[in-house]
Amino acid sequence: MIRQMTQAVLVAGFTLLEYLRSGRIFLELIATIACYVILLRPTSAAMNASYLFAVLGIFGPGMAVITTGFIVGLGDRPQNYIVLTHNVSRDAFLLGLFFAAVIVTLAMYGILCALVALFNRATDLTLFGWTLATLPLILNTGLVAAIALLLSPPVLSAGWRLFVLALIALALSSNVISGPVIAQISEINPLLVDLLRAIQTILSGPLVPVFYGYQLSVSRAFDSAPAWANLLAQCLLLLSFLGLARYGFHRRDLIFSV
């Protein structure tokens, strides 16, 4: 276990060096500065903490999707798979890519927070409150990075990726499939409506900690047991998605392509 973690850190460091050398990190920097200029720059009205973390809560996971896609694309090259033939396990290689993506994402988050702290600090936010609100946001960022890793070509085939995306879309479809659509389905067969609602409830269950974590970042209401229980649920969900990615990567044959 210690050896695999050491290898993962080394793979992450090597990937980060390649990422910096490729110049792709400038895309994240531009996106970070654009987010600050468009949404968080000083205005006539003072910014409050709820608005700040409403923006940061979307920025972090969104940046995680972009960065993880770039990192996985950088790692999914024939020359990088040679590393796996030199006593580097698949687990360490996959974790290294995940660590590299999370490090870059959190670095962009730190830059954005530094810009806000220097030029447009929220009036109702202390350093301790900022730290607490950052905890669920970081876990959400890791969760989204793990999902993006799971849905990457080295882990799942195209068919399985479409299947998982369909499940996620169905879990999020409760607000879309409603009203007239539900009425039409009910006319065909009322049991289909009950079945659809049951499937949506089952599939949306794992996403509850993600949305509640976002709410915690915005409200910073950590004075109750459910708040800390949700942090634990986010950690367990993160480990679950990483475990699924690990399983998928072990099941996939390494394809050398240009």
Image: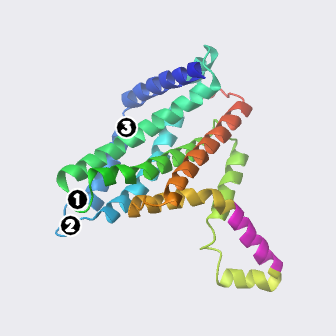
Q: What residue is shown with label 2?
A: 46
Give x and y (percent) for residue 249: 67, 34
Give, as a three-letter code, the residue at label 1: Arg
Quote the CA–CA distance across marks 3 and 1.
22 Å
198 drawn magenta: yes
Give x and y (percent) for residue 205: 65, 60
Judge from the rendering whether residue 1 lies leftward or rightward of residue 11; answer left or right.
Answer: right
Q: In which quarter of the image is residue 39?
A: bottom left
Quarter of the rendering occupied by the C terminus: top right
Picture residue at 16% right of the left edge, 69% below the top: 44
Picture residue at 58% right of the left edge, 51% below the top: 233
The label shown at residue 25 is 3
Q: For numbered disc 3, what is the local secondary structure? A: helix
Q: Taking the image as drawn, is residue 7 in sight?
A: yes
Judge from the rendering whether residue 33 lies leftward or rightward of residue 219; answer left or right.
Answer: left
Picture residue at 77% right of the left edge, 75% below the top: 194
Q: Give the range drawn in magenta.
A: 191-202
Contact between marks 2 and 1 (CB within 8 A): the answer is no
Report the label total. Answer: 3
Give, as a three-letter code, the residue at label 3: Ile
Q: Which of marks 2 and 1 is nearer the N terminus?
A: 1
Q: Which of marks 3 and 1 is nearer the N terminus?
A: 3
Contact between marks 3 and 2 (CB within 8 A): the answer is no
Give x and y (percent) for residue 226: 53, 59
Q: What residue is shown with label 1?
A: 41
